[in-house]
Image (cartoon, grey):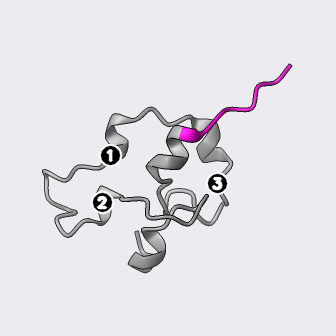
Amino acid sequence: MNEPKAKASSCPLCGGDNECGNLAPTAGDADFYCWCMDESIDPAMLENLPPESRGKRCVCRACVLSYTPVKSC
């Protein structure tokens, strides 16, 4: 992530802290861990992120858990 840490640590959907384990002081260590590794994240949610945030800013746990996919008829 090349963005400033303050922006990279905010969720692109709600602006809250995304608690990304990759931004932790030990990032780069073989033993790093992020909460998202235990979650199933709907690809449609990620597709709806602003293009400038995709692959650069993580969505927070609250947004992932509260996401409801739009169902087509």
Q: What SS does tag 2 mark?
A: helix
Q: Position of residue 31 (x, y in %)?
A: 13, 51
First to last magenta residue range: 66-73
Q: Which residue is mark 3?
A: 49
Q: Residue at x 40, y 35 (%)?
A: 39
The label shown at residue 66 is none
Q: Main secondary structure of the magenta part?
A: loop
Specify whether 72 is left or right of 24: right
Magenta run includes residue 70: yes
**Residues packed near mark 3 inside 10 Å, few (<14), some (14 to 19) or many (20 plus):** some
Q: Position of residue 14 (x, y in %)?
A: 59, 60
Amino acid type of the residue tagged 1 in the rendering: Trp
Q: Position of residue 21 (x, y in %)?
A: 29, 57
Q: Nearer the viewer, residue 59 or 66?
A: 66
Q: Position of residue 29 (x, y in %)?
A: 14, 59
Q: Which residue is mark 2?
A: 22
Q: Residue at x 86, y 19 (%)?
A: 73
The quadrant where residue 5 appears: bottom left
Amino acid type of the residue tagged 2 in the rendering: Asn
Vertical order, 66 against 56 (above or below): above
Exactly how many numbered labels are in the figure? 3
Q: Which residue is mark 1?
A: 35
Q: Nearer the viewer, residue 37 or 28?
A: 37
